[in-house]
Amino acid sequence: LKPLFLSQLGRDHSRVALLPTEVMAPRKASNSPKVTYDYAGLKEGMRVQAESEGEFHAAEILQVSDSKSRTAKPVKVTYTGFDKVYDEWVGGDRLKCKALKKVQPEIEKRPPLEFNFGYWKIRGLGSIFRMIFEYKGVKYTDNQYETGPKWFDEDKLKILAKNALANLPYVECGNDCVCQTNACLSYVGSRLRLNGNGNKARLMNEQLLFEVYDVRNAMIDLVYPYKTVCRTEAEHNEKAIKHLESNPFKKFEACLEKSGTDYFCDRTLCTADFPIWEMLDQHRLLAEKHKKGDIFADIPKCKAFYDKFRALPQLEKYFASEDYKLPVNNAIAAPYFL
């Protein structure tokens, strides 16, 4: 920024450097985050660099004010070589000086996420959430209901007070209380960043959550007598074999072929990967019970996914725990397949 020197007739005929008024126009408001400065090191007479209209110029400190009315702009400077008419009060954002210190604002630490989870004392749908919590290493309370009265007569009433849709599973985190399986998975996925990176992955993750739930419902139809699909164990045996032979994971194999990734939605795990693995494992057990051989024979990519997931170090603790050894289905419902 070059000053304009104008000759002024006076007693000493001196020349005074003036800046055009359009150059020294008021600064526009900044949208930058607010920064706090420590002005204790600044003294009168100290040489600094002061900014005007986007450029820094040599300047000298005339005064450092501690007045509350000048908190935003406590330093008065004069620009070297310019008339005192351009002296002004500035803040730390317009100064360069080693003696000026930025005060780093204290970052409010958020408390770590903690989940309160409830489901029957079986693998069922509960295993999916237990694996997610273990995989992400978050703190959680696992309320495993072994009998109906503990849930229906006690805890369900507490959940109803928070959510009219009270059911198992439920997930609580902070002030949130979420019920219904896929809603719980979507919620946990959003809190733990497991719903996919990018719109394409998120969309596939959501679709697969519903697709694998269909597979799970087909398994439930085979397992529990009260569903009336299999009224006797003989019917269960016959229909279970047909179900296994239908290869319920063909769609999932196609998804892996199309994605070209180790996991179903992204290069990293998403929420849908957990129920898919659980269903693969349950079908493996069902096939072993009925001596139907290797369920992975025609779905090699699903097999690779299954093995990679099973070997994850984050889940080593879960697979070695009693939780993984829980019965797959609820004994109180007299299932044909535990």
Image: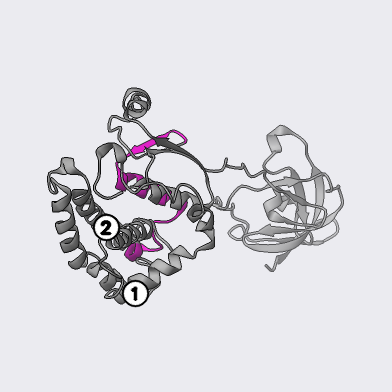
State which quarter of the image contains the N terminus: bottom right
| Amino acid type of the residue tagged 2 in the rendering | Val
Q: Which residues are magenta?
A: 174-201
Q: Nearer the viewer, residue 207 or 298?
A: 298
Q: Residue at x 67, y 42 (%)?
A: 72
Residue 193 included in the magenta stretch of the image? yes
Residue 172 occupies quadrant = top left
Q: Is residue 139 left or right of residue 267?
A: right
Q: Residue at x 61, y 41 (%)?
A: 108
Residue 268 appearing in the image:
no
Residue 116 place in picture, x, y as percent? 45, 37
Is residue 293 depicted above or below 64 in this figure?
A: below
Residue 181 included in the magenta stretch of the image? yes
Q: Is residue 223 left or right of residue 131?
A: left
Is residue 242 depicted above or below 177 in this figure?
A: below
For disc 2, the marked residue is 212
Residue 265 appearing in the image:
yes
Residue 69 is marked as none
For disc 1, the marked residue is 301
Q: Nearer the viewer, residue 199 or 58?
A: 199
Q: Residue at x 82, y 61 (%)?
A: 13
Residue 275 occupies quadrant = bottom left
Q: Nearer the viewer, residue 189 or 312?
A: 312
Could you classify mark 2 by the number of other residues whose Cα lies within 10 Å: few (under 14), some (14-19), or many (20 or more)? many
Distance CA(mark 1)–CA(mark 2) = 16 Å
Residue 161 place in picture, x, y as percent? 35, 24
Q: Earlier in the sequence, mark 1 or mark 2?
A: 2
Per the image, label 2 sits on a secondary structure element best described as helix
Residue 235 place in picture, x, y as percent? 13, 52
Residue 227 place in picture, x, y as percent? 16, 43
